[in-house]
């Protein structure tokens, strides 16, 4: 059984600027993470292409990269 606690936070007109700043910061972080992910994928493709990896080597490389992402996600929790 889970202990679920619900909290209600009241916001007023003074909080609108703060809420917008938080929303903007979250979007900026998402964009930055997407850019890093795209860059890493391009690097993987270039590595596969340059070294002419066969399908099994490419799959191993992708699995290693997915483990890196999994470990990074665990560190964030």
Image: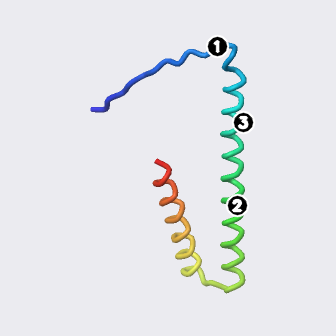
| Residue for point 31% across, 32% down | 2
- Counting residues from the start of the chain, the first of labels 2 and 1 encountered is 1
Measuring from the top left, give residue 46's x and y in whole percent.
Answer: 72, 76
Above-or-below relation of 24 to 34:
above
CB atoms at circles 3 and 2 under 8 Å apart?
no
| Whole-number angstrom distance, CA of label 3 to CA of label 1 | 19 Å
| Whole-number angstrom distance, CA of label 2 to CA of label 1 | 39 Å
- Counting residues from the start of the chain, the first of labels 3 and 1 encountered is 1
Left or right: residue 59 compared with residue 19: left
The secondary structure type at the circle numbered 1 is loop
Q: Which residue is mark 3?
A: 24
Above-or-below relation of 74 to 42:
above
Local crowd size for mark 2, using a 10 Å CA cut-off: few (<14), some (14–19), many (≥20)? few
| Residue for point 61% across, 16% down | 11
Left or right: residue 53 compared with residue 50: left
Of marks 2 and 1, the one in the foreground: 1
- Counting residues from the start of the chain, the first of labels 3 and 2 encountered is 3
CB atoms at circles 3 and 1 under 8 Å apart?
no
Local crowd size for mark 1, using a 10 Å CA cut-off: few (<14), some (14–19), many (≥20)? few
| Residue for point 67% across, 86% down | 51
Local crowd size for mark 3, using a 10 Å CA cut-off: few (<14), some (14–19), many (≥20)? few
Above-or-below relation of 61 to 66:
below
The secondary structure type at the circle numbered 2 is helix
Q: What quarter of the picture does the N terminus occupy?
A: top left
Left or right: residue 50 compared with residue 11: right
The secondary structure type at the circle numbered 3 is helix
Residue 38 is tagged as: 2
Measuring from the top left, give residue 26's x and y in whole percent.
Answer: 66, 39
Q: Quadrant of residue 62?
A: bottom right
Residue 12 is tagged as: 1
């Amino acid at each position: 059984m889970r202990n679920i606690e619900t909290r209600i936070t009241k916001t007023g007109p003074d909080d609108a600027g703060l809420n917008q700043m938080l929303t903007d910061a979250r979007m900026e972080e998402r964009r930055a993470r997407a850019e890093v992910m795209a860059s890493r994928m391009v690097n993987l493709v270039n590595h596969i292409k340059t070294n002419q990896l066969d399908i099994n080597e490419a799959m191993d490389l992708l699995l290693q990269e997915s483990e890196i992402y999994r470990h990074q996600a665990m560190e964030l929790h």
